[in-house]
Amino acid sequence: MLSKLKIIFLIITFMFIWSCGDKTKKISEILEVDIEMQMASAYREGYLELQRGDVLLAAKKFNEAELLFPQSPWAAKSSIMAAYAYYTQDYYSDSIFELERYLKTYPKHKDKVYAHFLLGINFYEQIVDEKKDLKSILDAKEQFELIIKDYPTTEFAINAKFKIDLINQILAAKEMYLARYYLKKTKWIPALNRFKTVVKDYNTTIYTEEALHRLVEINYRLGLIDESKKYANTLGYNYQSSDWYKNSYKVFNKNYRDGVKELQKDKKKKIGLIKRFKGLFE
């Protein structure tokens, strides 16, 4: 009789626990659905505010959506949207902060490549010119190089390559600016090193021809004739028709006459003589 009572008691206890567990599970599911709805609502509000142009409120709503349901797949997207909202109105520091936080919080998220690209653009758009601080330029280049290396088949990689070409033009311009300054001050060695950097690291830019000519010129001044000829040959091989090559040729040939210019001079002289000759009969 006692054992039967124990069995009945155990059955009743199990049913009570099961009932409570099921009830707790249902409450938990309801709460989760409610939080998810709140998150969706916050995200939607953020999107609407972004369209209206209130980017600060939009970013706040996206952050709110992320905090409400951090386990949701939409949390990471909300984080990126907050960064994008700041970026649209040039709040670069806030956008960079959000993107760096996103990359740390969601290191395996599928939209990482977009975050790196937007981060690069934030740095890129703060570039003023070659005379200013290099930090923004180098930070932008780092992000674009990462995209080319890790995501080479994406559309972002194509755009990143284009941006790096422009960045290299700016970096080369800075080197040339400093090199010309040293050249003007007759500080040959620092000038030489700057021009070498342009030829070595930025040889696809528009400054390569002048840099090669300056290397010809400076080495010749320093008595390094073989070195000077080496750069003259490189310049001639790649840019034989350029004015910089002609200038370099004059370094070694003091009596060099530019054929085209001489013909133009001769033509002007001829016209002058004809005019003077006609004047004799007027």
Image: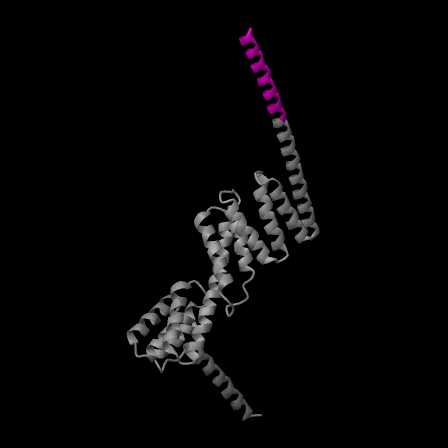
Quadrant holding the C terminus: bottom right
- Residue, far top: 1
Q: Nearer the viewer, residue 56 or 280?
A: 56
Q: Residue at x 33, y 78 (%)?
A: 220
Q: Residue at x 30, y 79 (%)?
A: 223
Q: Nearer the viewer, residue 74 or 260?
A: 74
Q: Image height check: is 255 above or below 280?
A: above
Quadrant holding the N terminus: top right
Please provide percent x and percent y for residue 37. Answer: 66, 37
Magenta region, main secondary structure: helix
- Residue, far front: 2
Q: Residue at x 57, y 51 (%)?
A: 98
Tell me how many marks there are: 0
Q: Is residue 126 left or right of residue 203?
A: right
Q: Range of the magenta residues?
A: 1-23
Q: Is residue 38 visible?
A: yes
Q: Is residue 32 left or right of residue 271?
A: right
Name the quadrant containing residue 121.
bottom right
Q: Residue at x 63, y 25 (%)?
A: 23
Please provide percent x and percent y for residue 73. Answer: 57, 39
Q: How is the image coloured?
A: one colour
Query: Per the image, is 3 magenta?
Result: yes
Query: Per the image, is 261 magenta?
Result: no
Q: Image height check: is 97 above or below 237?
A: above
Q: Is residue 114 visible?
A: no
Q: Nearer the viewer, residue 279 or 227?
A: 227
- Residue, far left: 226
Please provide percent x and percent y for residue 183. Answer: 42, 78
Q: Is residue 212 left or right of residue 36?
A: left
Please provide percent x and percent y for residue 142. Answer: 46, 56
- Residue, far right: 52
Q: Image height check: is 111 above or below 91?
A: above
